[in-house]
Image (tube, rainbow, N blue to C red):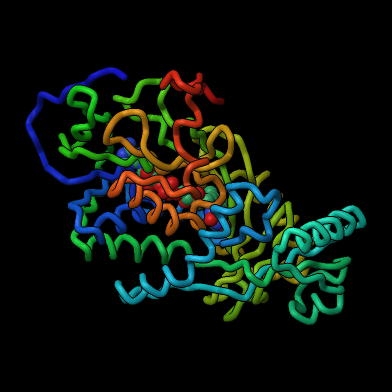
Amino acid sequence: MPVRKWRGPVAQRSDIVVIGGGIIGLAVARRLCLAGLAVTVLEQRRTGRGASWAAAGMLAPYCEFDEPDPYFILCRTGLERYAGFIETLRDETGCPIEYNATGMIYPALSDRGLARLETRYERHRREGVPVERLTVREARRLEPDLSNRIRMALRYPADHQVENRDVVTALEKSVRLHGGVVREGVAARSIVLDGRRVAGVDTTDGLWNAPKVVIAMGCRSRYIDGVSPAHRIPVRPVRGQILALRAGAVPPFRHTIFTREVYLVPRSDGRLIVGATVEEAGFRDEVTLGGVLQLFRGALELAPGLASCPLESTWSGLRPVTRDGWPVLGAMGTPGLFAASGHGRNGILLAPLTGDLMAEAILHERVPPIMRPFLPDRFYPAGTGEAKDDSNR
Ligand SMILES: Cc1cc2nc3c(=O)[nH]c(=O)nc-3n(C[C@H](O)[C@H](O)[C@H](O)COP(=O)(O)OP(=O)(O)OC[C@H]3O[C@@H](n4cnc5c(N)ncnc54)[C@H](O)[C@@H]3O)c2cc1C
């Protein structure tokens, strides 16, 4: 690790600086503020306007269940804490936060899809996942706007969804209410060290002095100086394009409708969110004709009646994805330096739990067992303290 000692004028001092004002940085900052620390969040643009604004807000560990591995346990635990977290956040801030606990419906539209869902149903039941098998009639009774071409459906009653933009707005307010400083338009350039320890962050607005720093820069988390190339967080951007239809005064669905190709997320103001592409496009976060076409096709296949809905808006965001697809949480090799990044397609779901786990690691130097598989050192070869070559595409 190169030693980079700051020699310029001191701008500010905090107990801890969180770099990145997305849902992850804000959730971590809030927990540290609640513990009485002087916390500064540095955000290069506007808080919460990265992936956290672009997301669809599904809280869906069960619908997306694949293996009963540590990542599933993390996501399931994240969901278990969500409703309570939203209640507390509403009470603290007075902010409205839309939360929908109706569940999700996963329909099959073809013979292949039908066979896949039958297998899925049996496996999920064996693994104790809360899932119901619906006939076509049952599914269309619950959601009459579903295509009459569906062959069957699974219902996941325990999966929820939240208006993620409400959450980031409330989180920022909570951080400020609890004494945290949120600085927008300030980009972190480099971690500053004093010997081997963290001493602060060099920014476009001068030095922020702090003995502890959390890197929560989303898909840009590997791009900060002062961290040796071998120890950088191996995160890359994965683009998701998404759009909103204006479906009427109330949305056409009560449940979120989910398939492998496309999902439809109803919002209480009558919008229907149609997402999302999964693309390796580097840092290009534009909306493309091909991306929108893919979403239109998928949505119309699920619900042909949507053809008459006005298109309200389109956008895209960059998911922070690690080399192994799991988040990176906890202490990095340098004393005082922490990572909270790489949440991929589950960062909205995992934000409250990430705040709790990071607070344990930062305040008490404890690594709860559920956090252990996600430590940054899994990218380092055992025993050497050196990171593996993490040059990722
Ligand atoms: C289309 C789409 C759909 C999604 N749907 C879901 C979903 O349904 N459910 C779910 O759980 N998750 C979903 N996700 C994933 C989720 O949005 C992300 O995992 C989560 O938002 C990541 O949060 P973050 O705070 O790490 O990143 P971000 O929200 O991107 O925040 C990082 C912040 O760091 C700032 N930053 C970067 N570099 C610097 C710097 N040098 N100095 C200062 N600030 C800096 C950025 O400006 C940004 O604001 C979706 C994502 C996308 C793109």
**Residue 361, x across and y down, in percent:** 35, 46
Q: Residue visible at 51% across and 58% down?
A: 349
Query: Which of the pair 45/39 is nearer the observer?
Result: 39
Residue 314 visible in the snapshot: no
- Vertical position of residue 53 compared to residue 106: above or below: above
Q: Quadrant of the C terminus?
A: top right
**Residue 168, x across and y down, in percent:** 39, 60
Q: Residue visible at 36% across and 46% down?
A: 366
Quarter where residue 258 is shown:
bottom right
Query: Which of the pair 356/101 is nearer the observer?
Result: 356
Quarter where residue 330 is shown:
top left
Q: Residue visible at 47% across and 62% down?
A: 164
- Vertical position of residue 158 compared to residue 57: above or below: below
- Vertical position of residue 329 compared to residue 309: above or below: above
292 to the left or right of 199: right
Q: Residue visible at 58% across and 54% down?
A: 73
**Residue 385, x across and y down, in percent:** 41, 22
193 to the left or right of 307: left
Residue 46 visible in the snapshot: yes
**Residue 312, x across and y down, in percent:** 56, 64
Query: Which of the pair 316/324 is nearer the observer?
Result: 324
Query: Which of the pair 56/12 is nearer the observer?
Result: 12
Quarter where residue 279 is shown:
top right
- Vertical position of residue 295 compared to residue 187: above or below: below
